[in-house]
Amino acid sequence: MRIGYAAGAFDLFHVGHLNLLRHAKQHCDLLVAGVVSDEMLRQVKGIEPVIPTAERAEIVSQIRFVDDVHIETSPSKLDAWQDVGFTHFFKGDDWRGTEKGRLLEEQFAAVGVEVVYFPYTMHTSSTALRRALEALTGPAPAAEATLAP
């Protein structure tokens, strides 16, 4: 049985996320979507998620291509592999040939997991959506100072 794993923040869900999950499901019998937790997004990417982990997991779980959801609470994809036991790891081809991509391929090759790349959806991304929202609403306010009574 081919168990696939496609991980992402899935914050500000868009067609690129849908494309990744659709392509992934076409290449496996069971697809598990890894949803990176709020804490990991802050720690690894330095971003504040717009949609909380539980809500992102609920949204992704309702996509017909997704059979199960795994919340990632560790920055290591090998930890996710130990938890889920997938045989195939799916990623956008923007990672192909990068240092991070090569490291991922090496780590997974050592445990028999195949890394499969799919075309990255160039015209949209969560980063682009964040920029568009900021342009419409202005920069996110800094933490408000408490006023003394």
Image (cartoon, rainbow, N blue to C red):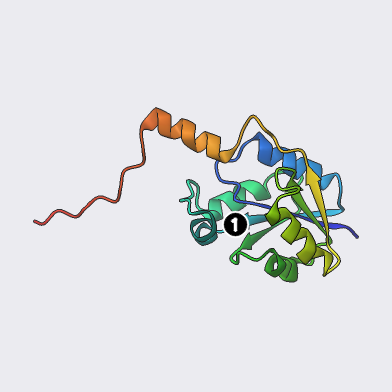
Location of residue 34 by image quarter: bottom right
> How many other residues sit within 10 Å of disc 1, few (<14), some (14-19) or many (≥20)?
many
Amino acid bearing label 1? Val
Residue at point 59% right, 50% down?
9
Question: Residue 28's x, y, as percent?
Answer: 86, 52
Label 1: element kind? strand
Left or right of 64? Residue 44 is left
Give me the residue at 47% from left, 46% from top.
50
In percent of width and height, residue 81 lies at 74, 66
Image x and y of residue 14, in percent: 62, 36
Residue at 67% across, 32% down: 122
Q: Residue furthest left?
A: 149
Is residue 78 positioned above or below 9 on the image? below
The residue pinned by badge 1 equals: 36
Left or right of 63? Residue 55 is: left
Number of marks in picture: 1
